[in-house]
Amino acid sequence: MLVEGYLFLFSLYILLSGLFVQQLTSRWLWAGCGLSLASFLFVTLGFKNLTLFDFFYGLNLGSIFVSLSLVLSLFYFVQLQQSLVRNLIFWVGLLLTIQSFQWWFVGDQTSFQTNLVETLWLNLVSGGSFYHDLKCLILVVCLFVCVGVYHRGTTYYEFDYAVMILLGGLASLLVITQENLILIYLNLEFQALLLYILTTYYRFEETNSEAGLKYLLVGSLVSGFFLVGIFFFYFFNGSLNVSELTSNHSQVWLLANFIFKLGAVPFYFWTPAVYQQLDFPSLIFISILPKLSVWFLLFKSCSLLTFDNSNLLYWSGVLSIVIGGVGGLYQLTINSVVAYSGILNVGYLLLFSDQIFSTEILFMVSLYLISYYLVLGIVLTGFSFFSSSFVTEFLNLSFIGFFCSLSVYYFFLSLGGLPVLPGFTAKIYLLGFLLERNLIETFLVIFFSLFSVVYYLRVTGFFLFYDLPLVRFQYEINLLYYLFLICFVNSLGQTFFSFW
Amino acid sequence: MISFYRLNWFLVFILPVVGLFSFYSLALQPLIFQWWLLLFVPILLFISYFWSVNFSFFLGLSLLISLWSLGLPCYCVINKVQVLDSFFFDWINLPFLFLSSLFFPYTMIVSRESIRKNKNIYFLLLILIQLFLVALFSTNNFFVFYVFFELIAFPMFLLIGVYGSQPARIPAAYKFFIYTFLGSIFMLAGLISLYYFYGSCYFGVVVDSSSQIYFFFLVFFALAVKIPMVPFHLWLPEAHVEAPTGISVLLAALLLKTGGYGLIRFVLPMFPVGVHFWSSSVVSLGLISILFASWWATAQVDMKKTIAYSSVAHMNVCVLGLFCDSILAIQASTYMMLAHAFVSAGLFTGVGVIYDRYHTRNIRAISGLSSFMPTFYFWYFFLVLANFSFPFSGNFASELIVFMELISKNLFIGLVGGLTVFFSAIYSIWFFNRVFTGPTSSKYQAYQDLTSAEYVSLSFCVIGVLLLGIYSWEYLAISFEDYCFHLNYIFQN
């Protein structure tokens, strides 16, 4: 992490100095952001004593990361009218697609299976861990934000926004590297401050200021809980290390903070209220990054949870499923659909809070996390073309093409967990472990996943049915094309790998 | 420059198709060296570059897939060998593969004129469904069956919701999708627990007799939605009414058969104790479905709804046959699905003929067509006769055997179920009489008789039904051994 952190700061420095010296235009600014993130990603991966060749023969999920980051970073250089570059991207996309076929085909011939079975990690390389996956995912999400901003077009004070996204990525990376509770607290606050600022970024909008204020007040209260938890822990145990966090009394206070940041049931009220006011790039950032870092903290401390506290997380999960399933039903904006679907999916995973230290369950949970948040990021990146988040306004916007609508259909059904889509693999594992535990939980999950499919379908219906497009834009849709292809192919590989 | 605009959207669908081909290659591992399949990509690029994609391209592709999906099964069945690990071919699924090979080109021909917008996407979705169906009908793994069973819902949702003609198509599409999803997620839970407890979803897996009851319960709902049996049938009339003609044909001729096929191929051999335990409930549900659907079909004024409810009734006769614990009845049920595919495809095509000309499907709005469209009248007459199982039709042969076997097991069930023959005569004749005979009006006169494509498709169905009626015993004799082998539990009990 040390070397990588320096590299990251170095690329940040280059970017910022470039900004001051060369007076970059806004689009080039985002190109630089994306490029630095992508290069960081590659450097991170390259440091595992691997050649690029070995790297390509890794797991499918790793291939998703790589292909996505390649495609996305290339997209920064696309201008609407430059056909040469577009053709280049076309061929690169094609190569990547073929490459992912290759990953799929070599699956049973190389160390593909042994990687999965022996280490049970989703990481690209043997010896990797969930930590590396999460790091990749955080970086990819930052990339998504950059792409989203690029698509959205110019806003005011882009420089501030870019700095905040990069610092936010850094903060999330820092959270998952710390062991000391004080440092975790500081990093979480660092992250949260950026989130508050992002929420109120359009400060001339009254609704944004209101949402930001709500977020700030409730968030401060809950970080107070965290401090109290640290106090109790230090008072009774004399330690500040997360891996020794065994005191029941302090766990409750820390869990309250985690539950708040995940948006699970007792503290879920803020999510629809805050998300509602965001534009899509900020929504990607706020709905994914803090949750990822908190999930990692939970994984670290879940094995130490006492019975009462894991029970608390369990019931929080059950209630989140109910609220997330029913609450999303007649929502009018994409943002609130995302909020409730987040509550629902967090609920699925919280059901396993008492078992999360077992390797298989952790594998399942991380698979679910990655496929869910990756697809969510892709969907919201695609939506960044649109200025409005009201579902009913998308029927006027369907001019961007039938295939764009089709990929939205694909991605939303993937979130719903239908076959041969990435979410399906995750759902197979989820249902499998649930069936081993308890039949009632299984039926709960089944019943409310039906609800979620209903409200995802409702969103896609506005894209698909109400207006058949005649005009097609060329450039914007390309992005979705290749994301569509790559994810389709990779998910096929994943799905059939596990059952063949 | 290459027109990337066209190329790109072509790729979006072709690459998944290629992916499916490579999925097959995964199944064909001992036979085919997989890397060959990567050649498909440049070849398809080449084709799409030099050849403007049109109807004939898709028809050709569909015929190619048909040939390919019939060739290997026929080889396997005739030589009595199984050359593939993951697929299984015998006389049980050969008729279904035969159906899917015939009816996709048929659907394309039927909908060539009636689909006006986004034609290429329509045909590409049809080809995707064809590939899914071929895989569904040839796999020996229940889980793979489930995956394709569920996958068919995606393109169907689009085909109903985008290509239908009225605003009500959208709720119909939602209804179709949600019913299918509700059924199949229980099936998913059942199959995952099967996989976790027994290590495989292969149809030869031996399942505990006590847990078979539980597995049957979970798995049955998805199939009952597709057949459809009465509490779960509500999506069917809506989907038929709102979908374009070609999709109605597809639904009636093929998609309803996936439910019955799943019962024959997986449920009966895998969970015999579950079948025994639940058969009384399923049979009573089937009887209720038959009576309800037949009675309800007589009350409809929409032609497509009449035919849709008659399909419900006929498919439930198949269910009765499947659950009456006799191999002859199971064979006859399969055969009835085959015959019903031809009949209902022809009937829906006929409704499409009327709708293309008069833009209504209301039985009360149309009368006396026989004087203006005598050829249509002639071919449709055969189809209506076959619908109430007139002798020399495939339906007659199969219904005769099913009811014979039913009566030999239980007189009451046989008699009550047999009422469907009477009812189907009522609604078929009533429907035919209103539409084709009676007072004529000059407003119908302006239209022509059947076009060549319609002539070919209707006569194809009629000839198919008649051939099925004549050669019925051939199929029963030749397939008896396979059925005995596949459903050997009956001799154990």
Image (spheres, coloured by chain):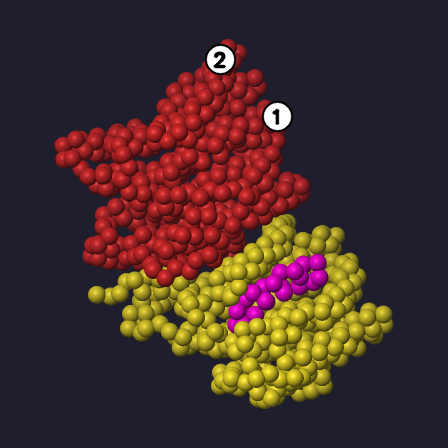
Chain colours: A red, B yellow
Query: Tag on residue A231?
Result: 2
Locate residue B274: give its quadrant: bottom right
Q: Give the left or right position of residue B433, taking residue A274 as reference.
A: right
Q: Is residue A330 visible?
A: yes
Residues at badges 2 and 1 in contact (C-beta under 8 Å)? no
Magenta-highlighted stretch: main secondary structure?
Answer: helix
Q: Is residue B91 left or right of residue B356?
A: right
Residue located 65% across and 65% down the image: B227
Q: Is residue A51 visible?
A: no
Residue furthest right in the image:
B411
Say what secondary structure mark 1 lies in. Answer: helix
Give the mark count: 2
Residue topped by disc 1: A307
Mark 2 or mark 1, which has the lower sequence index?
2
Q: Residue A17 carries which label?
A: none
Viewer-closest of B444 and A220:
B444
Give the residues drawn in magenta, as a range. B228-248
Q: Is residue B231 magenta?
A: yes
Front residue of this view, candidates B289 and B198: B289
The chain to which mark 2 is attached is A
- The numbered mark 1 sits on a residue in which chain? A
Nearest to the eye among marks 2 and 1: give it. 2
x%, y% of residue B210? 75, 52
Q: What residue type is labelled 1?
A: Phe
Q: Quadrant of the C terminus of chain B?
A: bottom right
Residue at 64% across, 58% down:
B222
Location of residue A31 in the rendering, given as x and y in whole percent from the top left corner: 24, 42
Label 1 Cα crowd, 10 Å radius (few <14 / some 14-19 / many 20+):
few
Relative depth, front residue between A315 and A44: A315
The CA distance from mark 2 to mark 1 is 22 Å
The quadrant in which the N terminus of chain B is found is: bottom left
